[in-house]
Image (cartoon, helix red, strand yellow):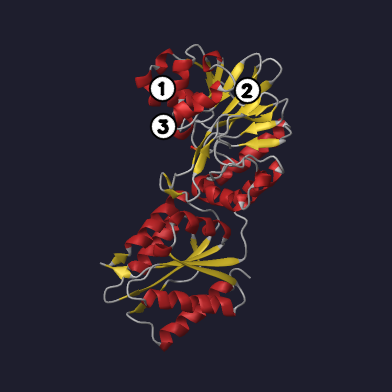
């Protein structure tokens, strides 16, 4: 995206009018070291149409960008693909500028708008409900709507510009990258960022994603460009990100084991390294992450690609160490599909962490493939040997 005066035109009459949030470092808990963008799109045809808006604090910037192209008062239609406020937050500002505009959204979107914007007079807004396959003629261009329920909110939908073959995909296929280069062929590591975004936002919705991909196939639409609600626009190879979503949604992984742990006095750390050595010795790729030295967002991205996760926690006050608890709470919400797990950890007297971690892992949807290993105080030679053997056995599950 660009801050320069010339508007960014994706196709004739289709403009990016979003904003770049360069300094965003936390997106409701998701760590965003590269910032993000809130992408909105303006279609100038016989009917002038805005697709999505931006976070409320950037309303003036978006209106200024629109004003470089048309008078915002001339907007006829506003498409609300998604009610979450990073995309709808500037709707009150738009409806103030263009009070006669008609809003198009899903049924759940209409309900969501009423629950968010009562204080802004939304009762007076003209809101039309659309469904998958509904079309709206703008003159020379036609919009078709595709409901994307629970991808990732109940109200989510996408807008397809038929003549330009552009899919405006709201949160789906996005990434949190703030960049002055708007397209996938201009930015490195876009797939890695897309994977992190998928893991942290869309992982719980694999079944919905596969159904959505089927719907797009059934509609028989060609897609030349995917313009999501965040990050770069896929113009070089939009099929690549759809294929990746299919792969992630089906739970396809690399042959890799991930060890995630925290430690109090180093004993669980010794266990983690010994288990790692056992896995390595069996010729299987393994990665080790200390929870307090890595942010949860990047840990979850590693979980996406690993079929087996080993979680280690020391016992603190008869239970799980707090940082490990936080990880497990996050995992329960994301509920990864088709993954296996093992728990381990050290303890001093009563123990308790390993059993509790196992319970949480099961609640998060993991299949436990080995009994948890716990060692009292420091791992001695025998304890280290037990860790090595556990690692070797675990490696057998991914070979
Ligand atoms: Fe980017 Fe669900 O909001």
Marks 2 and 1 close (CB-CB < 8 Å)? no
Judged by depth in the image, the label closer to the viewer, 2 or 1, is 2
Determine whether, in the image, residue 25 is placed left or right of residue 77: left
Marks 1/3: CA–CA distance: 20 Å
Q: Quick one: label 1 or label 3, which is nearer the N terminus?
A: 3
Mark 1 — residue? Answer: 114
Residue 167 picture location, percent across and down: 65, 33
Residue at 47%, 76% in the rendered image: 273
Locate residue 216: give its quadrant: top right
> Where, quadrant-wise, is the N terminus in this rendering?
top right
Q: Is mark 2 within 8 Å of ligand 1?
A: no
Residue at 62%, 62% in the rendered image: 254
Residue 137 circle label: none
Locate residue 225: give its quadrant: top right
Residue 42 picture location, percent across and down: 59, 24
Determine whether, in the image, residue 301 is placed left or right of residue 266: right
- Residue 321's place in the image compared with 34, above or below, is below
Residue 257 picture location, percent across and down: 55, 67
Mark 2 — residue? Answer: 43
């Amino acid at each position: 995206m660009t801050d320069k005066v010339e508007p960014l035109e994706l196709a004739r009459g289709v403009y990016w009018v979003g904003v770049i949030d360069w300094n965003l470092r936390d997106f409701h808990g998701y760590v965003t070291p590269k910032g993000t963008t809130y992408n909105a799109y303006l279609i100038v045809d016989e009917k002038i149409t805005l697709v999505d808006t931006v976070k409320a604090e950037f309303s003036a910037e978006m209106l200024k960008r629109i004003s470089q192209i048309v008078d915002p008062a001339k907007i006829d239609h506003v498409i609300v693909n998604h009610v979450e406020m990073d995309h709808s937050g500037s709707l009150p500002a738009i409806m103030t500028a263009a009070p006669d505009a008609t809003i198009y959204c899903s049924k759940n979107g209409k309900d969501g708008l009423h629950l968010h914007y009562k204080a802004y007079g939304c009762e007076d807004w003209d809101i039309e409900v659309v469904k998958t396959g509904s079309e709206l003629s703008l003159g020379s261009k036609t919009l078709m709507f595709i409901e994307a329920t629970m991808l990732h909110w109940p109200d989510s939908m996408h807008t397809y510009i038929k003549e330009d073959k552009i899919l405006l995909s709201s949160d789906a296929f996005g990434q949190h990258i703030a960049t002055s280069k708007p397209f996938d062929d201009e930015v490195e590591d876009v797939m890695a960022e897309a994977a992190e975004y998928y893991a942290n936002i869309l992982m719980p919705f694999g079944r919905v994603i596969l159904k959505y991909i089927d719907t797009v196939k059934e509609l028989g639409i060609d897609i030349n460009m995917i313009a999501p609600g965040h990050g770069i626009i896929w113009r070089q190879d939009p099929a690549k990100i759809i294929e990746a979503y299919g792969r992630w949604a089906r739970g396809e992984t690399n042959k890799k084991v991930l060890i995630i742990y925290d430690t109090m006095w180093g004993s669980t750390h010794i266990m983690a390294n010994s288990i790692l050595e056992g896995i390595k010795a069996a010729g299987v790729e393994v990665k080790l992450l200390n929870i307090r030295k890595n942010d949860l967002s990047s840990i979850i991205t590693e979980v996406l690609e690993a079929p087996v996760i080993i979680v280690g926690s020391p016992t603190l006050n008869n239970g799980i160490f707090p940082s490990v608890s936080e990880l497990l709470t996050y995992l329960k919400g994301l509920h990864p599909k088709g993954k296996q797990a093992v728990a381990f950890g050290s303890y001093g007297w009563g123990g308790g962490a390993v059993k509790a971690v196992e319970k949480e892992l099961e609640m998060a949807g993991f299949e436990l493939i080995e009994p948890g290993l716990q060692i009292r105080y420091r791992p001695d030679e025998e304890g280290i040997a037990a860790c090595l053997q556990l690692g070797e056995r675990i490696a057998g599950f991914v070979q």
